[in-house]
Structure formats: C-alpha cells, structure tokens
Image: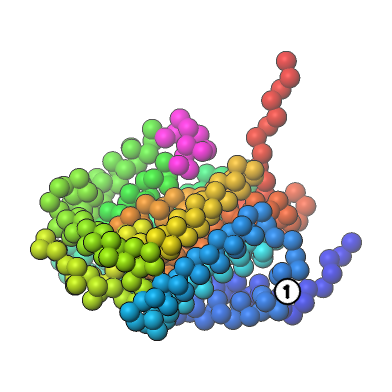
Amino acid sequence: MNAPPRSIPDRATDAGLMLFAFALPLSIAATEITLGLTLLAWLATRPWTRAASPGVRALGIATLALCGAWLLASATSETPLASLIMARKLYSVVIVFLLADRARDAALANRFVTTTFAAGMLTSLIGIVQFAIRHARGGWQEPLEGVFSTAMTSGNVLTTLTVVALAVVLFERPGERRSWFDRSALGLFFVSLGLTFRRGSYLAWVAASVGLVALRRARWVVLVPLVVALALVLVPRAGRERAVSIAHPVDFTSAGRISLWKSGLAAFRDRPMTGWGLQDSYSLIERYKRPDARFPAGHFHNNWVHVAVTTGAVGLLAYGAWMALAGWCAWRAFRLTRSALAAAGLAAWIAFQVHGLFDWSFGDAEVADQLFVWLGLALAAGAGAALTPREGSATLNSTVRPPAPQSS
C-alpha cells in the first residue's frame, strides 16, 4: 500500500531539519534562524495530535518547571528585564521535543545524523587548517578554535560530536552502509578535539567513552587508557601539558575556577531562594571577588554553581530534576533498544555533565543545542515507532535486542 501524501508543513519541517542539522556545528546565527523557521513549520503539523515518545510528557512538565523557575528568578532580580532577555535562551530546549517527534522516521533520523556529521567534519577541517597555519607561524601554544568564538566552546562541541560518533560506530548494525563515513567522522572529530587543549573537554570525552565501551563490551574498557596514552603522545606539547596539569594543585585556571566557585557560594548564601537573576554575572562576580581571584569572568564556569547563584534553590532543584529525567530517558531508550541513537543521547548527556563542571555550558547555545539534539534523537529511538526506509535495511533507529537465552 502506498503511503499517504505528505503535507506541505510536513515537507517544510523535514527540509528545515536538514538545514538546521547542517548549521548546528557551523554557525549559531544560522542555527537560530533555521530552528525558528523549522519550529513554525512543525507547529503547523499539529504535533500535539500525535502520540508522544516515552518520557516526552514527563520531560515537558520538567521543562515547564524549569521555565517557571527562570521567570521567577527574573521577576525577583535587581535587573528584571536584563534577566528576562537572557532567560529567553531556554526556548531552544524545544529541540528535544521537535526531534523526539520527527526522528521516529528512521530515514529522516539517518539523514539528520549524516548531515550533522558532514557539517561537523567541515568545522573540524576549518579548525585544523587554522591550527596548521598558526603552527607554521610558530603558534603551537594557541588552541584550535575553528568557527566558534572560543576554544572552550569548540572543545565542548567537538566532545559531543566525538562521543556520539563513537556511539554510532560501536552500536551500528552489521552491513550498515554508512560505517565508513561514521568512522571517518569519528577520526576527524577526535583529532580536532585533541587540538583544542581543553582539559574539561578531555575529561568529558573519557567519561562518555568509558561508558559507551562498557555498554558495548565491558572487557574493552581496558583499551581506553591505551587510547588516552596514545593521544597524549601524539598531541602537541601544549595540549599534553594542559592535560597533565589537571592534577596540578596551583594551576592558574584551576585555582581561578575554585575562587569563582567560592564567590558563587557567598553570593548564593545572600539570595538562596530565587537567586540574583540570569543577566550577565560580571558585576556580581566583581562584587564577591576574592583576593585569590585569577581572571575576570561573566559566569561561574560551572553549570551547577551558576544555576544556584542566578536562579536560587528553586532553579537549582528544577535544573537538577530536568537533567536527571533527561538522563533517565536516554538510559531507558538505550536499555530498551540498544540502538545507536539512544547510545548517542546517553553519551552526549554524560559528556555534558562532565564538561559542565568547568564551564557554564548550559548557557552556551552552541553546546546546549548539541545536548538537546541528541537527547531528542534518543527519545525518538526509544519510541519504537521508527520506520525503515526500505524492507530489511539497517538504520540508526533500528532496535537491536540481545538474543534470547537458549533453554537447556
């Protein structure tokens, strides 16, 4: 039986998703524009009339609670308008629900991942070329920045791309045509990540990679230290020194972050319930600046500290509940399906928790959007309603269940 013709809003939504996927690792401006247009088309498809993926309703309630906490923090802030303007960034969480709905079509999910990886490879190549040019001019100490404003943003974005590519490589089904492409993307992402010299990103990659390898083959976990050691040998000297300085007790940036976190604790104690608001925190940090502060900052370089200071205990509880529920949904999707997309969502969630200990990554749209994308794809995988593009083909959303035990 032929499938019913797709409506104009459906076609526009899916076309917009492909543009969004390509813009995601390349340009935040293009990402925002394509996301806005895609959302308008998606709403025209009346998504509320379709059955939701498992976990979507609960995560929707948690999202409303998080929005309420941010609005409350803005209303009680010393600068309500400035806080409200910053709070608007939370709207991009709708990416989770958009993809949880549309990516249940496995053909579209495959195209989305392919497009995102292709754009990520372009981002990586741009960064590597820039790095090589600076190296030729004697700039070994300068990290890879690529198309983003800072190496920290690049490092966190590339961490996400690296671990989700690893998930796709580890959990793809036999005979998958895209295996060569996914492996090429993984290699390129890994090289460019190493050149960012971001220690928090390195730690996030290690944590998510250990988790993925343990889920695929627990005995393979012993290979992760070998890969880390090999990477330390191959990475430029500046990157190696940055990596090993993680354990150095008087490292400049580590000591600076600890000072920031202590300032944040002092600020939280003064306004513990609804916080200081979501406006730029530079003036607040200066107000609570400690004698041991090392550098100026506009945020507290830690998701949990920043959320506590800006939105208080109410916002901290809402943020913690949202993150815990999102992680549980990704884990549930993986446990039920063992699919590549569910594994990718879980890996992205793990990496985000780790690098978020060293940066305000939930407020960095380029990084947070990556989290929302892969969580949405994981929810879609967990729906168990993916349709294969053709009979018998292997797809990223295909359910892979372990064989049933043989009876004796």
Number of residues whose C-alpha sits closer than 10 Å to that of mark 1, classed few (under 14), some (14–19) or many (20 or more)? few
Classify residue 66 as left or right of residue 45.
Answer: left
Write the residue at 50% across / 65% down: 66
Residue 57: x, y in percent? 64, 60
Residue 347: x, y in percent? 48, 50
Task: Please tell me whether residue 228 is drawn above or below residue 136 in the rendered image.
Answer: above
Instruction: Tell me the chief SS of the magenta region.
Output: helix
Q: Which residues are magenta?
A: 211-221
Write the residue at 22% across / 58% down: 262
Write the residue at 30% across / 57% down: 358
Quadrant (top left/top right/bottom left/bottom right) for the C terminus: top right
Q: Is residue 177 visible?
A: no
In the image, residue 15 lies in the stretch drawn in magenta = no
Between 295 and 273, the one lying in front of the other is 273
* Residue that extends furthest to the right in the rendered view of this protein: 1
Task: Please tell me whether residue 156 is drawn above or below residue 298 in the rendered image.
Answer: above
Q: Is residue 81 visible?
A: yes
Quarter of the image for residue 254 reads bottom left
Task: Please tell me whether residue 224 is drawn above or below residue 161 in the rendered image.
Answer: above
Disc 1: which residue: 46
Between 141 and 369, the one lying in front of the other is 369
Write the residue at 14% across / 58% down: 252
Between 136 and 243, the one lying in front of the other is 243
Quadrant (top left/top right/bottom left/bottom right) for the N terminus: bottom right
Task: Please tell me whether residue 276 is drawn above or below residue 353 in the rendered image.
Answer: below
